[in-house]
Image: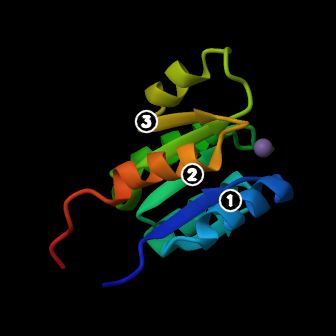
Amino acid sequence: MAKKRILHIEDNPSNRKAVQHILRATDYKLVEAANGEEGITLALEENPDLILLDIQLPRISGYDVARRLRSEEKTRRVPIIAVTSYALSGDEETASEMGCNDYISKPYRPKVLLERIRRFLEKEPHAE
Ligand code: MN
């Protein structure tokens, strides 16, 4: 069975490194985008099984990325976990309104991120 693919859209290199490290011990294949435009392109081209989406991105915000992905047939149903640094700003509601399935705020514990990811990716196996 093909490895599940996770697209991480995050402009901060050290945050991308942190996720690389967390996923190293798993069987997931990581695809990375450093900004919203690249993220949208890769989401449409790489058929990710899940998207980890930083909300604080330059130019196109994570909210706009989520809204765009929800408007595209190819990415309409891909689970999106929003990641933000601001815990108490109403981001959770906004993330949900923009079509994100879940929400985690930085800093998070690696174990918690993995649990969230697995909640979406380790459900009943897809018929292929
Ligand atoms: Mn950012």
Toward the left, the furthest residue is 127
From what the image shows, is residue 22 above or below residue 47? above
The earlier-in-sequence mark between 2 and 1 is 1
Q: Is residue 34 visible?
A: no
Give, as a three-letter code, the residue at label 3: Gly
Residue type at the position of mark 1: Val
Identify the residue position indicated by label 3 in the image. Answer: 99
Q: Are marks 2 and 1 in contact (CB under 8 Å)?
A: yes
Q: In what element is the residue under mark 2? A: strand
**Residue at the (42%, 72%) spot, across then down:** 4
Measuring 68% from the left and 57% from the top, which residue is drawn there? 37
Image-quarter location of ligand 1:
top right
Within 10 angstroms of label 3, few (less than 14), some, or many (20 or more) residues?
many
Report the amino acid beneath label 2: Leu
Which circle's residue, 3 or 2, is located before the other in the chain?
A: 2
The quadrant the C terminus occupies is bottom left
Separation of marks 3 and 2 at Cα, in angstroms: 13 Å
Towards the viewer: 114 or 33: 114
Name the spot of residue 36 as percent of width and height, x first.
68, 52
Tell me which corner region of the image, top left, top right, bottom left or bottom right, holds residue 63: top right
Disc ID at residue 52:
2
Kindly report the distance in space between the C-alpha atoms of the residues bearing marks 3 and 1.
Answer: 22 Å
Residue topped by disc 1: 19
Residue 27 is left or right of residue 40, and the answer is left
Q: Earlier in the sequence, mark 3 or mark 1?
A: 1
User: In the figure, is residue 73 to the left or right of 35?
Assistant: left
Estimate the x, y position of residue 34 in percent, counting from the top left. 75, 60
Residue 111 makes an appearance in the image: yes
